[in-house]
Structure formats: C-alpha cells, structure tokens
Amino acid sequence: MDDYFLKYENRTPEPPLTYSAPREMVWQFMATLALVVGAWYIWWRWTGSLNTEALWFAVPLALAETCAYFGMVLFVFNLWKDDPITIPDAPATLGDIDPNHPEKDRTLVVDVMFATYNEDPELVRLGIQDAKNVTYPHPIDIRIHILDDGRRDDMRAVTEEEGVNYIARPTNEGYKAGNLRHAMEHTDGDLLVICDADTRPFPTILENTLGYFTDPKMAWVQTPQWFYDLPDGQSLPTALQRQFGPRGATFGRLIEKVIGPVQLGTDPFVSDPKMFYDIIQRRRNWANASFCCGAGSIHRREAVMEAALRSFGAKVETRLHATEEVITVSSKEREIAPDLMEAIRTEAATTEVLTPYKFHVSEDIYTSIVLHSDRERGWKSKMHPIVESKMLSPQDLLTWTVQRYKYAGGSLDILINDNPLFRRGLTFPQRMMYATTFYSYLAPLWNLIFLAAPILYLFTGISPVSAYSADFFWHLIPFLVTLELAMMIGTWGVSGYAAKSSYLSFFPLGMRAIWSVLRGQTISFKVTPKVRQSGNFLALVKPQIAIVVLTALGAVWAIITLATGTTSHSAPGVISNILWGFNNCLAMAGIIGAALWRPENDEGSQHEL
C-alpha cells in the first residue's frame, strides 16, 4: 500500500457541530430579514432598475438574480432548524427494533456489505479488517460480505484469508444497485450496512446508530462521510519559497501578519463534506427528509424489500393495464378471458425486475424518495451527526469531475423523468427539501450569466441597470450584507467560502449535465477511481481559465477607455464590475489550482494502493 495514505491512518474526525438554541433563533431572525430585504431588492430590480435601452442584457441578469433568490429561499427552508444531538441506546434483541416479529428474543443479525468492482483488493481488505473490529454492547451477529462485480480471483482470495463471505454474480446489470439487489437475495440480515470499496467503518458504527431503529418506522440511518486523507497543505511562506526563493517566503510572512495564517492545498478539490452532512443533511431531520448517500448508511431490510415489492407490484399492474388496453382495442372485445388475463399478469411479473435499490446512477437518493413517499408505512430516515467511518477523497481533478458529473446528471435525470415534487405520498416539507437538492443542480444556468455579466460590461460599457447610482447601491448593499450575515450564522462552525466558490466554478460540468439529460443521454455509471490519475488536467478547466483571462482583459480595457474618455463606462460601473469580476476570478482560481495540484512527492504517475 502506498505510503501516501498510510501517513493519515491515525487521523480522527472532528466532532459534530453542537446545537445552540440561541444561535438558531438569531439565524432564523437574520434569515427572515435577508429574505425580506432580498424580496425588496428583486422587486426593485424588475420595477425600477432595468436598462430599457439594453433589455437583452438587463432582463437575463434580473432573471438570473430572481432564480438565485428563489434558491436562497429553498436553502433557508432547508437550514431553518436543527435538533440537539441525542444518541439512543443500542437495541439488545430483534424485538427492540421489530416488536411484532415472532423471533423477537433473537440476536440481531447485521450484514455489512462492501460493493466493489475494480478497486485494489488490498484496499478492500482494510475495510474488512476494520469491520471485524466493530464493537457492540450486546451479543450480535455481524456478517461481512464482499460484493465483487469484478469477479476477481485475487479479491476472492482476500475474502478467504479474512474469513468473510464472497458474493459475485454473472453480469453487472444495474451496476451498484444491481450488485446490492443480488447480495440481498443471498443474505438475510435484519439490518444492512452499505460500504464502498474504500469505506473504513469505525468500531462504534453499530453501537451509535442501531438505537434509531427502536422506532419501528425508521427505514435507514445515514452517517457522515469523512475523507481521512485530505492533505495537510503548506503555509503560504513555504509555498512562495518553493516558487520564488527566500524573497517569496518573506513576502508570504508579511501577508500572514496582515490577514493571519494561510494554509494552501489543504483541500484542493473542496472535498470536505462537513457543510453537506453537518449542516444541510442534519437540518433535514425535522422534516424527515434526510436522504441516503450510500456509503456509511444502515438500512432496515424490511423497509427496502417492502418498498421494492410495492414498486414491483405497481409496475406489473401498469404493464398489465397497458397490454389489456391494446388487446381490447384490437379485438373489439369489452372483456378478456380470465385465463388469458392471468397469463398476461404472469408474463408481466416475469418481465419486470424486482429492484430493492433502483437501477439508477443516483440509486441512493432515488430509493430514499421511494421510501419517503410510502405514506401507508410512514418510513422515516435519520442523519446521524457523528462520523462513523472514513474513506478516500478524490485525488485529482479527473476523479472529481467523474464524481460530480455523476451526482449532477443522476439528480437531474430524476428531476426530469421522475420528479419527486409531484410524487404522491411525500409531505410538503419533504418535497421542498428534495426541491432544494435538485434546484441546486440547475444553478449553472444563472451562474453562467453572473460570470459573463461583468465581462460584458467591462468590454462594452453597456449596463444591465439604468445607472450605477446611489439608488442602486442603496438596494444592493443591504441585501448582500444581510444575506452574508445570515448565512454566516446559519452555517456557524463550517467555512462557507470554499463551498460557494466551488458552487460557482462548477458551471461547465453542470451545463454539460443539464444538456445531457435534456437530450435523453444515459448518465454513466462509471466507478469513481480510487487512485490518482496521471496527466495534465488543465484541459478540464478551460472555461474557468477563459473567465479569468476575459475578466482581466476587460478590466484593463475598461480602465484605459475610462481614463481616455472614449467610452460610455462610468467610474462606479467600472469599479463595481471589476470587484464583481475579481470575486468571480477568485472562485475560478480554486478549481484551476486543483487542476495543477499534485500530492507531495508525486512525479506524475498513479498512486497504487
């Protein structure tokens, strides 16, 4: 195994963010204030600020701001409230999680499943060894299964050496979802833990999570994902010294004296999921809308199988009715003979596939929607606050791109083809939470306008507003200030700038995902690589580089023309758009830097695990 990962073995995750009722009250007040001021600003933008001589520019920008404001409304709804952290007592027997089960005095059986395809068997071995060290305060039957879609002899050998169960299948139908379905046909645990090939469970994963299942309606529990191998980075003086020598180090130290310590390269791909799990997902618990994210989740087998059976039955009936309609129309008969109907039903049931986990690139969130919408059973979910496993982060921009494109395309595919907003059974809060997730993947549509607008003004002097006047700043600045203060309080304890920058610089990949889904293209099930890919990744960030270059050239051009008085630029307009463009360039700089980033001692080849 490569020493690059071994040196991080002793790292431990940060504790979850603490709950503060007073801070939550301040957040809710500031969020409400920001929404009111924002609505005032948006109303003014449409009614009192549009440049009527350039509506082709003014209207798209105002529309983009309106779309962003609506996203802000959804995000505030998502973050509205949290709950104190409480860890329920671990159940002792099956009866504690299923009071009506005939074997309620039986020991709990938990299947720990590692889904793997082409990852290094030695990487999977680490997860197996950690799973064997899981502890529990009561007798429990933990069964570890390796679901090998690669059907590899060396993977089978590892499982035999570790004394765990090896499960393979003849095809790769349904990819990970199909792999899990096949494994469930060959196992019978009461609960199952889903792990990726690089998941390393902590000893407390069952002790701290199974207590939620004492609620018979609890279908699954998601635990936070944590990347233990995020690089330490280096201080600004050290980085500058490597590039420019002792003078660079001196300059770096001077900067740090002014703004404080600066650490570069600690998370080049903004992989730290703390914002997502500790803020966004946790705040969905009050609405019973936290969704499954795959690795590190624990599921009640009964819930998964029951949802699959209901979906299976509904699809069989749909297929049956469609066939019945075709036969009655073609034969002119009002009814079909019972024996023929039974044959049609049998054929429909044989043709349809029972899928406990949906055959979809985003099978996790898809299955969550199916379970949440089962109003008859009222299945619940929970985002557990404590990190209970560790895994590997993306090691290069290509890997990051594959992963993010899969997330975006899969979510948008669900939005277009099986929109949860109109799915029967979901509550209004659940619909809004899922809307927040899917709406966020549409943001590249208006973010592209936000990136292009200052460039357009700086080159042409054409303004999207009637004037960069005191009235403009009187409406804009209060909105920006109240919004920033509200979000700072609402996400207290997590740095938000890197996430916002990544959100903005994501636009090329997001646009590609949107275009692919609209064209009906299948989103790839490509496995995220677990080794660093070699090569130059600047080709992946050409659009972001173009934004930086065009913004810089536009700023120079605007300053020159303003100084010579040969254009319609105004001083407030130039200053405002240069600052706006500079903020955009800072956001682009993060992902451009990620394209150039290499681990320490990396010489361009792949890291072998």
Image: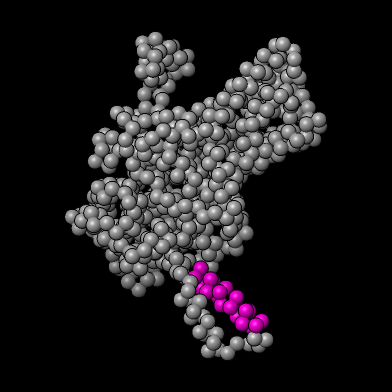
The image quarter containing residue 185 is bottom left
- Residue depicted at x 60% and y 24%: 551
513 displayed left or right of 455:
left
Magenta stretch, main secondary structure class: helix
Q: Residue at x 73, y 33 (%)?
A: 57
Q: If the image is split into quadrants, where does the C terminus sit?
A: top left
Q: Is residue 471 left or right of residue 424?
A: right
Query: In x, y percent, where is residue 237?
Result: 39, 16
Residue at position x 73%, y 30% in the image: 464
**Residue 436 visible in the current orientation:** no
Where 66 sits versus 151, above or below? above
Q: Quadrant of residue 49?
A: top right
- For the N terminus, the quadrant is top left
Give the camera-side residue of 369 and 34.
369
Magenta range: 310-330
- Indicate whether 438 appears above or below 593: below
Residue 304: x and y in percent read: 43, 64
Quadrant for residue 41, please give it: top right
Q: Magenta span has 323?
A: yes
Q: Nearer the viewer, residue 602 or 209?
A: 602
Residue extending furthest right?
A: 52
Viewed as shown, does residue 475 lie left or right of 545? right
Asked if residue 599 is among those painted magenta in the image, a careful observer would answer no
Q: Position of residue 56 (x, y in %)?
A: 75, 35
**Residue drawn 41% across the image and 58% down it:** 175
Residue 607 visible to an observer of this rendering: yes
Residue 317, image x and y in percent?
55, 75
Q: As displayed, is residue 374 above or below residue 66?
A: below
141 vs 208: above or below: below
